[in-house]
Amino acid sequence: MAGGGREWTLTASRLELGGLNFAGIVDTVVNGQVIKVLKFTTTDMKIKDLVQSGEISPGTKLITAARPGSTSTVSSGRIELFTVQLKGNLDILGIKIPVDYSAAHPPPLNVPFAVFTEVTVRNTDLRGGTLKIPGARISVVSDQAPVERR
């Protein structure tokens, strides 16, 4: 069973996954409930215009955003990604095909490389690799007003 714990969301204008393998559907625990997620492994991730957000307590979110126009990377070895939903456009030679992958609707093919645009990914866990976010801005946002942290 995957680690999980909390769900978090990644949005990006472009997501490139190299050394990609769809490893199947696995169980994980999120907020005390067992759910089914997609498990991917990859060796290289490039994320343009990264914004990650996740609830850290009821009514409070942690948001991490890269400098606009920059490309964040996850590299250095095998990376495991546990995904509730991957929604966006699969870019095949410039042709954008809308996709919405989940445990109920997994990817139909296992390909070694994929590029997605205008993508939103709901994840429960990411293991391995080193994440580099150029110009990272971290904010804590509550129901009242955001508090920026550096």
Image (cartoon, rainbow, N blue to C red):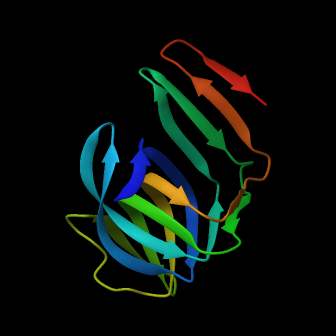
What count of labels does the image hold? Answer: 0
Give the left or right position of residue 1, taking residue 49 as reference. Answer: left
Q: Position of residue 114 (x, y in %)?
A: 50, 79
Compared to 38, does 111 lie above or below? below
Q: Looking at this rendering, what residue extends furthest in the left direction?
A: 104
Q: Position of residue 47 (x, y in %)?
A: 62, 62
Residue 132 sits in which quadrant?
Answer: bottom right
Compared to 65, does 85 lie above or below? below
Compared to 139, does 48 lie above or below? below
Give the left or right position of residue 103, taking residue 148 as reference. Answer: left
Residue 99 or 136: which is nearer the viewer?
136
Quarter of the image that includes the N terminus: bottom left
Q: Position of residue 57 (x, y in %)?
A: 46, 24
Give the left or right position of residue 84, taking residue 79 as reference. Answer: left
Residue 58 sits in which quadrant?
Answer: top left
Residue at figure coordinates x 31%, y 66% from the top left: 101
Quarter of the image that includes the C terminus: top right
Compared to 45, does 36 lie above or below? above
Q: Position of residue 92 (x, y in %)?
A: 47, 84
Residue at figure coordinates x 25%, y 48% from the top left: 34
Q: Looking at this rendering, what residue extends furthest in the top direction?
A: 144
Residue 147 sits in which quadrant?
Answer: top right
Residue at figure coordinates x 38%, y 77% from the top left: 23
Residue at figure coordinates x 66%, y 75% from the top left: 77
